Image (spheres, helix red, strand yellow):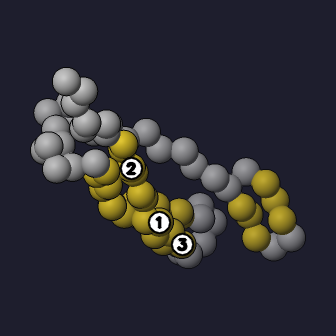
C-alpha cells in the first residue's frame, strides 16, 4: 500500500486459471475471456466501504496453421 495524501492506493495481482479443455476450433486464431472482479474494501473504524470494479481481459494466442 502506498499512502498518497488522503487517499491510499494499492495494486492487486490475481491469478486466473483457464481450463485445459477449453480448446479453440480450427477457425479460432485468437480467444479472449472478458470478466469482471469486484473488491470491497471495508474501513475498520467507520461504516464506510469502497467497491472497486475492474474488468479483466485475458487473451490467448493459438497457432492453428498446419504445415503439410
Rendering quarter of residue 18: top left
**Compared with residue 68, is residue 15 higher up or lower down, i.e. above or below?**
below
Q: In the rendered structure, are the residues bearing label 3 and label 2 in contact, judged by CB atoms less than 8 Å apart? A: no
Residue that mark 1 sits on: 54
Crowding near the residue tagged with mark 1, few <14, some 14–19, many ≥20 C-alpha atoms within 10 Å:
few
Nearer-the-camera pick, 58 or 5:
58
Above or below, comparing residue 55 to residue 58 in the picture: below
Placement of the C terminus among the 4 image quadrants: top left
Q: Which mark is residue 59?
A: 2
User: Residue 44: x percent and y percent?
Assistant: 59, 61
Residue 35 in the figure: left or right of residue 8? left
Residue 47 in the image, given as x and y percentages of width and height: 53, 74
Tell me the CA gap for discs 3 and 2: 29 Å
Residue toward you, 62 or 18: 62
Mark 3 lies on residue = 50
Q: Are marks 2 and 1 in contact (CB under 8 Å)?
A: no
Tag 2 secondary structure: strand
Amino acid at each position: 500500500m502506498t499512502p498518497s495524501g488522503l487517499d491510499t492506493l494499492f495494486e492487486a495481482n490475481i491469478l486466473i486459471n483457464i481450463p485445459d479443455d477449453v480448446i479453440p476450433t480450427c477457425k479460432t486464431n485468437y480467444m479472449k475471456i472478458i470478466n469482471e472482479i469486484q473488491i470491497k474494501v471495508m474501513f475498520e473504524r467507520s461504516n464506510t466501504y469502497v467497491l472497486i470494479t475492474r474488468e479483466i481481459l485475458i487473451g490467448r494466442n493459438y497457432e492453428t496453421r498446419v504445415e503439410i
